[in-house]
Amino acid sequence: MPQQPIHFNEKALELQALAREIADKHVRPAAAKHDKAQEYNFEAARAVADAGLFRTFIPEEYGGHGAGVLALALVAEELAKADSGFGVAFAVNALGSFPIILGGTEEQKKLWLPQVASGDKFVAFCLSEKFAGSDASGLSVRAFEDGDDYIICGEKKWTTNGGVADIYSVFCVTDPNSKSRRISAIVVEKGTPGFEIKKIEDKMGIRTVPVVETHFDHVRVPKSNLIGGRPGAGFKHAMMTLDYARPGVAAQAVGACQGALDLANVYSNRRQQFGVPISKHQMVQQMMSNMAMKTEAARQLVYAAAAGIDEVGPSPTNSKMAAMAKCFATDVAMEVATDAVQVFGGYGFMEDYPIAKFFRDAKILQIYEGTNQVQRMVIARHLVRECADLEHLSEFIPVEEQQSYYEEAEVTHEV
Ligand code: CAA
């Protein structure tokens, strides 16, 4: 667990303030237009790059601020408060970079990370496939060795930032006969022959960021693009990456909550019914206060999960906390967005007001970067493991008596 209270370093707070400024100036005002047209906000991305925000999650030795996962969460939250789609467009650069940061060789870090830090190159993370979503080890995209190269064949699904990104961390099967070392992560750069974006998805929400199918038709890349230099570490790289990235998705959810809450707050104090602002009605007050409480609870959990990673790096506790933060905050985002629409009433259902977009954008938060069912599975597995440290409580649990209770119940039933 992180030390209490959570420490926010000066750099993180400076980056948060910059993100808020950019969100107010470049993201929120353009969100509806880009949402309608399903287009990426390049102008805001330029502003993010110029302000050095892509440096947030990159270690200092490679041109970053080395400000950590908590700073990444603060920035993602501010951007998502204005537009969830833009929030993920930013955070997915961290998701795609973490395999290199956590598992890459020195040469790979020196080659790719400074370009990400400067904002000259955007990144994407290619894990999911048509038949491998929650079951991330069931991949079929293949990378065959050919001399000093790998040749990649197959298709990836739901690549966020696809097309906009220049660097793709692609998870491929390199040894189909191995159980534990089947998968490797390989970097594929935009423009490599045979690598194509084939389908740009038409989405319910987060319409300001592209989500695409990426196709690999005998894509030849040098073996030096194999992340970490040794095949077979890909699944662990993917899991560690997700542990590091999930507080970022959770922070997007907190941003979405706050954005929806703020709008509902303004609306409920302006909208008059029965001769008073609806914020004077107790049932609206109940909704608003529940939304505020849940948002704050989610925020504290997310900051704690992020701070824990910054303090101790990869660990079972941090993996569990990341899953808890992702699951809790994104469930809360869906609830808060739903209630915010309710506060807006009929107007909330109309696209003339910004709140409908919050509702449409919230749903994916419960699905991507691991469905909330997967998060609960991860949390439950950690609980089972932690049980080994709770042996001293066994003496207080009279197992035999429980059995006799069931036996008795059975007898009663027969009678
Ligand atoms: N860190 C390090 N290693 C880990 C790990 C972790 N957090 N979790 C598991 N591992 C290791 C295990 O120790 C095990 O190692 P050994 O083989 O040496 O024993 C190995 O990985 C396999 O572990 P499991 O048996 O637990 O694996 P599993 O097949 O049962 O799957 C799972 C576990 C948690 C369900 C995993 O498949 C998973 O996280 N699925 C969800 C995938 C996901 O999040 N996809 C999102 C795609 S990205 C996205 O959505 C991006 C976007 O668009 C924005």
Image (cartoon, rainbow, N blue to C red):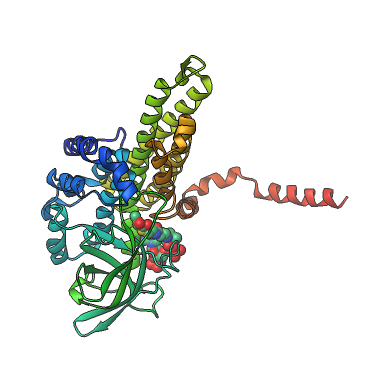
Task: Work out whether 277 lies above or below 86.
Answer: above
Rendering coords of residue 308 (x, y %): 31, 44
Splitting the image into 4 quarters, where does residue 51 fall? top left
Q: Is residue 32 visible?
A: yes
Most foreground residue, 275 or 112: 275
Q: Could you tell me which residue is drawn at 19 percent across and 39 percent down?
A: 15
**Ligand 1 quadrant in view:** bottom left
Q: Please tell me which residue lies in front, 270 or 397.
A: 270
249 or 266, nearer to the observer: 266
Q: In this view, which residue lies farthest toward the bottom? A: 147
Q: Is residue 48 above or below residue 130?
A: above
| Location of residue 384 with respect to 153 vertically, above or below | above
Q: At 53% from the left edge and 23% from the top edge, which residue is drawn?
A: 283
Residue 307 in view (yes/no):
no
Q: Between residue 153 and residue 265, name the one nearer to us.
A: 265
Looking at the image, residue 125 sits to the left or right of residue 296; the answer is left
- Name the outermost residue toward the top: 275
| Quadrant location, the N terminus | top left
In the rendered image, residue 54, in percent from the top left (x then y), is placed at 18, 49
- Residue at 77% across, 52% down: 407
From the top left corner, tell me how far across and down residue 146 is, in percent: 24, 85
Q: Is 171 left, or right, of 288 in this rendering?
A: left
In the displayed structure, does residue 55 sit left or right of residue 324? left
| Image location (x, y in percent) of residue 412 | 83, 48
